[in-house]
Image: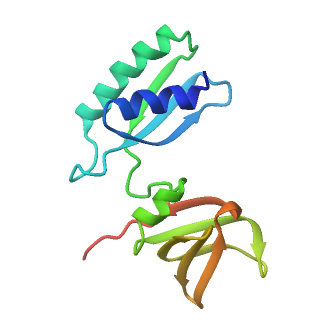
Amino acid sequence: MDLVVLIEKTVTGLGFELVDVEQSPRGRVLRVFIDKQEKAGGVDVEDCAQVSNQLSRVLTVENVDYDRLEISSPGLDRILKKPADFTRFASARINVRLRLPINGRRNFIGVLHGLRDGKVGMTIDTGEVELDFGNIDKARLVPQFDR
């Protein structure tokens, strides 16, 4: 079974959302980022411990070879990967890097409008822009702090 599918099945079975999985170059460290949309304030240490305990058992049973497992919240600058992320975080400020530039530009920071017909809509410093979802290399929320 694919490692990410195995992790996602376990995490969602516990009632959490799998945000991302990172592996160190040699696969010795597994970093798993989880979230719980309906929980105010996001995931806490107890949530991470619960997922870690269950995932450790599952990975042992499935003979997955790793040295260290790290479970974490996605943080304030959460990565956006899935189409649902771009819908959920509409009206948030995001930073997007494209695989292939548009008019010589690969980086965009602005307010997310959402995802429609495979296009991510944003308002940036020069106006409205639509970016192909498939051309997005990396997208993250931009943390906003009240003064």
Q: How is the image coloured?
A: rainbow
Does residue 108 lie above or below 18 as drawn? below
Does residue 138 lie above or below 7 as drawn? below
Taking the spot 54% from the left edge, 30% from the top edge, the residue there is 5
In this view, the residue in front, 6 or 107, is 6
Does residue 61 lie above or below 96 as drawn? above
Task: State which quarter of the image contains the C terminus.
Answer: bottom left
Query: Residue 94: horizontal and vertical position, in percent?
Result: 49, 69
In this view, the residue in front, 55 or 125, is 55
Query: Residue 139: horizontal and vertical position, in percent?
Result: 56, 61
Res 28 quadrant in image: top right
Res 126 quadrant in image: bottom right
Taking the spot 59% from the left edge, 32% from the top edge, the residue there is 23
Query: Residue 125: horizontal and vertical position, in percent?
Result: 55, 88
Asked if residue 51 lies left or right of residue 119, the reply is: left
Pick out the residue farthest to the bottom.
126
Pick out the residue farthest to the left.
40
Query: Residue 97: horizontal and vertical position, in percent?
Result: 64, 65
Taking the spot 46% from the left edge, 58% from the top edge, the residue there is 85
Taking the spot 56% from the left edge, 17% from the top edge, the residue there is 66
Res 12 quadrant in image: top left
Task: State which quarter of the image contains the N terminus.
Answer: top right
Asked if residue 124 lies left or right of residue 38, the reply is: right
Pick out the residue farthest to the front.
117
> What is the total number of numbered labels drawn onto the structure image?
0
